[in-house]
Image (cartoon, helix red, strand yellow):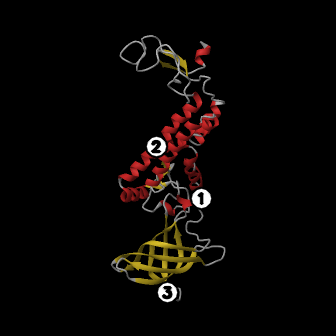
Amino acid sequence: MCAESASVWAVFGGQRISMSDSRVKLRQPWLAAFLAFLLPGLGHWYQGRRFKAAIFSAGILVLFGWGQVLGEGQATYSRLVLRTSVDSPQFSSQSPATKASYGFWAQVLVGLPAFPALLQEARFNTVDNSVGFLDAEIRSDFVGALIETTRQGDLRTPVTGTLQVTPTRPEGSRTVQGEFAAVTVDGGTASYRLGGEIQLGRAVFGSPRRSIECRLVDEAGNFLSARIEGTISRSFFNWYMAPLDSQELDRLHGSLSRQYDVAAVLTWIAGLLNLMAIWDAAQGPAYGYGDESRREGDGSGSGGDGSGGGDGDGARAPASV
């Protein structure tokens, strides 16, 4: 009883066989399973099962990578940021409220390729002192709106362009100075001076675009009744696999449509496939080895002599697994 409970069994050709058969050298199964989790195929390579290692590695990593490409690098994230107010969570210096992304529990089974999401989650959960504070010069493209305050209310004009802002003190400050070269939707161009306090989105956030707000000033530095609101570029290191919010998800679904859903599903499937690879590294092949003897009458053909499914009463040479 104890001997049987120490092995995993499968039925093949009418015979019950141990899946942990010595014909496949599993070496240290727990270590092989751990390596297979870290990187698809690595556990099988450790066991000397090089063909399976190549198949698992290529198949699973290509599937996961293709999902990332289809999702523009945003198909994998560990947390979804909750919008608890009208203000964007990008402007919150404290860690915003989040909830788990359940799809990530499938994605993380891919191992190391999904680990950046955990690193970004840890970085995201720290206090971000860069919100409303500039410590170095920024030069970036800008997409957003020029907002002029009038008696009738705010007048918004969509603009793009480039901006350059620097802190008013070398060590960094909340106040800035700079310039904005704007291009309107009809092709018109204009240049504006920027000054006063700046509002910057969190440094780490699951969007390639970082929110920014800044006032316009005249040549003497006096405030005008206008400001710019929009986004600038965020570095790849600060947005890849970082927690994102529902607004960013809406943008992705709007621009990619069902392609984004397909991207997420591909990454989930890749993780679940690696779960089977991990099991194979720990326990060996699940359906026998191809050299088991079949009992008389157990052949898969129409007769009882084993024709069509096996060789009857003889054993075949061990198969490579």
Looking at the picture, tell me which residue is in the foreground, 195 or 79: 79
Specify few, some or many for label 2: CA neighbours under 10 Å numbering under 14, 14-19, or 20 or more: many
Measured Cα–Cα span from mark 3 to mark 1:
34 Å
Answer whether labels 1 and 2 touch (C-beta < 8 Å): no
Q: Is residue 184 left or right of residue 204?
A: left
**Dot in front, 1 or 2:** 2
Whether residue 100 is visible to the viewer of this picture, yes or no, is no
Q: Which residue is mark 2?
A: 268
Residue at position x 52%, y 46% from top?
A: 61
Q: Which residue is mark 1?
A: 127
**Callout 1 amino acid:** Val
Q: Residue at x 46, y 15 (%)?
A: 312
Crowding around mark 3 (Cα neighbors within 10 Å: few <14, some 14 to 19, many 20+) is few
Q: Quadrant of the N terminus?
A: top right
Q: Secondary structure beneath disc 3?
A: loop
The reply to whether residue 109 is in sight is yes
Helix, strand or loop at label 1? It is loop
Amino acid type of disc 3? Answer: Asp
Element carrying mark 2? helix
Q: Give the amino acid type for the residue marked by disc 2 in the picture.
A: Trp
- Where residue 242 sits in the image (x, y, percent)? 53, 55
The label on residue 218 is: 3
Q: Is residue 126 above or below residue 302?
A: below
Give whichever of 222, 15 is nearer the camera: 15
Distance in Å between CA atoms under marks 2 and 3: 53 Å
Residue 91 coordinates in the image, percent (x, y): 51, 63
Between disc 1 and disc 2, whose residue precedes?
1
Q: Nearer the viewer, mark 2 or mark 3?
A: 2
State whether residue 91 is above or below residue 194: above
